[in-house]
Image: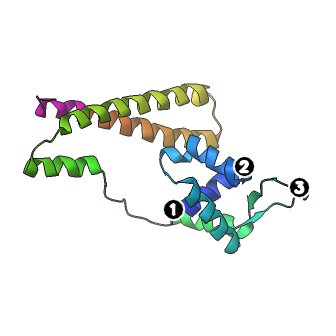
Amino acid sequence: MSLPHAILTALLEKPSSGLELTRRFDKSIGYFWSATHQQIYRELAKLEESGFIRALPQQPSRGRKREYEVLPAGRAELVAWVGRSEDPRPVRDPLLLRLRASAVVGEQGLGAEMERHLRLHERQLAEYLAIEERDFAQPALSAEARLQHLVLRGGIDLERYWIGWLTAALPEFPDR
């Protein structure tokens, strides 16, 4: 149920067309809640059908994108969702499962894959740190910006965790 709530959040931040929303999603929410463009468009239709969003009135013109805004029922749904209790979800990372399987069938080049993952996490950390420097360097942030920064800090800490874990695990693969 989280994708509709991610979309409601993004639309409350700024009414957008589906295309604008997918682009914004790729640059922000998508860092921690991924969705394909097709999934986003499908959810927009469901949210509109449910009365949570509506397409803004527009002048008839060919090729103009429909822009959506959140209706009071959509805001109420998001408020209720934010306040709900939800247990943490277990980690479902294929790399961890592949590592467990390698204990049974052998490494099969998994060391090189773990090195590749280490580089990917290092790149992601660098990107997050650049975003932090660009968007959150000023001393006095609004309450909204402080919460957004908190989400980014969570991503930074997760990337640092993965880098540390992968770095510690790599010596188990001397043939990489």
In this view, 149 is above or below 94: above
Q: Quadrant of residue 114?
A: top left
Q: CA distance from mark 2 to mark 1?
A: 19 Å
Q: Is 170 part of what is drawn in magenta?
A: yes
Q: Can residue 76 be seen from the camera position used here?
A: no
Marks 1 and 3: which is nearer the front? 3
- Residue in the foreground of this view, choosing between 71 and 36: 36
Image point (63%, 60%), residue name: 41
- Find the residue positioned furthest to the right: 59
Colouring convention used in this rendered image of the protein: rainbow
Q: Quadrant of the C terminus?
A: top left
Mark 3 or mark 2: whose residue is earlier in sequence: 2
Q: Secondary structure at mark 3?
A: loop
Residue at the spot of label 1: 2
The answer to whether residue 138 is seen in the rendering is yes
In the visual, does 122 lie left or right of 171? right
Q: Residue at x 30, y 51 (%)?
A: 93
The range drawn in magenta is: 165-176
Q: Which residue is mark 3?
A: 61
